[in-house]
Image (cartoon, rainbow, N blue to C red):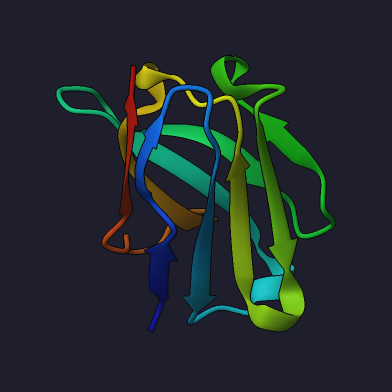
Amino acid sequence: QVQLVESGGGLVQAGGSLRLSCAASGRIFSMNAMGWYRQAPGKQRELVASISSGGSTNYVDSVKGRFTISRDNAKNTVYLQMNSLKPEDTAVYYCNFLPMGPWGQGTQVTVSS
């Protein structure tokens, strides 16, 4: 079955960086698009970045130029490099296949001002 294990979150000051990782299993990883989502308290979960099986990427406007999604098909892992972090980036971050499967536990990112 599908399993997603996110890691790499933490507490960071505004302007800092974090790199999130997501180990995925249960589907043929290399043939699937992947996405990073986030959910802030009291808000809906939103897709912030996606990467196709061929490596094409898309970002929500609020993270363009600051976040970079990448994938390593040999390791069945997708990454999210987050630079110039802002307090409004504070959320639980999740990865998922596209189309979505079951969710993992997510990883908390907290950006202090």
Residue under the point 39% across and 70% down: 5
22 vs 2, nearest the viewer: 22
Instruction: Looking at this view, name the residue that lies furthest to the left.
Output: 42
42 vs 85, nearest the viewer: 85
86 vs 100, nearest the viewer: 86
Q: Percent from the top left, x then y, of residue 69? A: 67, 46
Q: Percent from the top left, x then y, of residue 6? A: 41, 63
Q: Examine the rendered structure and indicate whether residue 85 appears above or below residue 11.
A: above
Q: Examine the rendered structure and indicate whether residue 70 appears above or below residue 89.
A: below
Q: Examine the rendered structure and indicate whether residue 49 appears above or below residue 85.
A: below
Residue under the point 38% across and 45% down: 93
Residue under the point 38% across and 51% down: 9
Image quarter where the N terminus lies is bottom left
- Residue 98 visible at all: no
- Residue 53 visible at all: yes
Which quarter of the figure has residue 86?
A: top left
Q: Percent from the top left, x then y, of residue 36? A: 51, 46
Which quarter of the figure has residue 4?
A: bottom left
Image quarter where the C terminus lies is top left
| Left or right of residue 75: residue 108 | left
- Label tally: 0
